[in-house]
Amino acid sequence: MARKGNTPKRIIAPDRKYGSVLVQRLINKIMLNGKKTIAESIVYTAIEEAGKKLNKTPLETLQGALDNIMPMVQLKSRRVGGSNYQIPTEVSSDRKLILGLHWLIDSSRARKGIPMAKRLMTEIIDANNNTGGAVRKKEDTHKMAEANRAFAHFARF
């Protein structure tokens, strides 16, 4: 494989309704099989309904939820002397956002029996209130990082 440096990150255009790159990234993550209009309707419905229930603008609602979900540390597996250690490492701001969106979508998809827009709305409201599956995932990650803090010296930068 050629190793001639990093490829530049693609610039994501803001979404049509709010002009927000954050909303567009959420739409792109929700999208399945290239069906962007369906993903847009799911995301727009979810953040508008969540905003109404919390008496905030839709963008404030989404940002507040992500602020409560985004982790400060992540665990990376490293093999040292025949055993694997989960090493806590600091997370960059871009990676925080990626993990936050990923956990938000995963926990909303885990709720079964209701339409995706309603599941996403419920998860966003729960994340704003520091409850729900995505916030639990963040807390579990932080607990594991705290438990494995003794192995932090194995991290190489």
Image (spheres, rainbow, N blue to C red):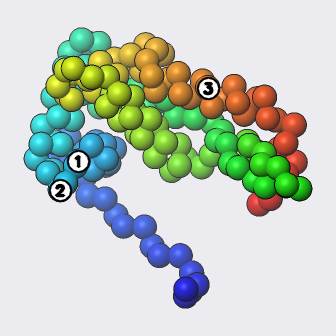
Q: Where is residue 138 shown, x and y percent of the image? A: 56, 28
Q: Where is residue 40 shown, x and y percent of the image? A: 16, 42
Side of 133 where 149 appears, left or right: right
Q: Are marks 2 and 1 in contact (CB under 8 Å)?
A: yes
Q: Quadrant of residue 57?
A: top left
Q: Quadrant of residue 56?
A: top left
What residue is drawn where x is 75% and y is 53%? 78
User: What is the secondary structure assignment of the residue under circle 2?
Assistant: loop
Q: Where is residue 99 shown, x and y percent of the image? A: 49, 42
Judge whether residue 60 can be spotted in this image.
no
User: What is the secondary structure assignment of the residue under circle 3?
Assistant: helix
Residue under pointer 1 = 31
Amino acid type of the residue that numbered disc 2 sits on in the rendered structure: Gly
Near-viewer residue (28 or 63): 28
Residue under pointer 2 = 34
Amino acid type of the residue that numbered disc 3 sits on in the rendered structure: Asp
Q: Are marks 2 and 3 in contact (CB under 8 Å)?
A: no
Residue under pointer 3 = 140
Structural crowding at the residue carrying mark 2, measured as other residues with C-alpha within 10 Å and reported as few (<14), some (14–19) or many (≥20) = few
Tell me how far mark 2 sits from mark 1, CA to CA.
6 Å
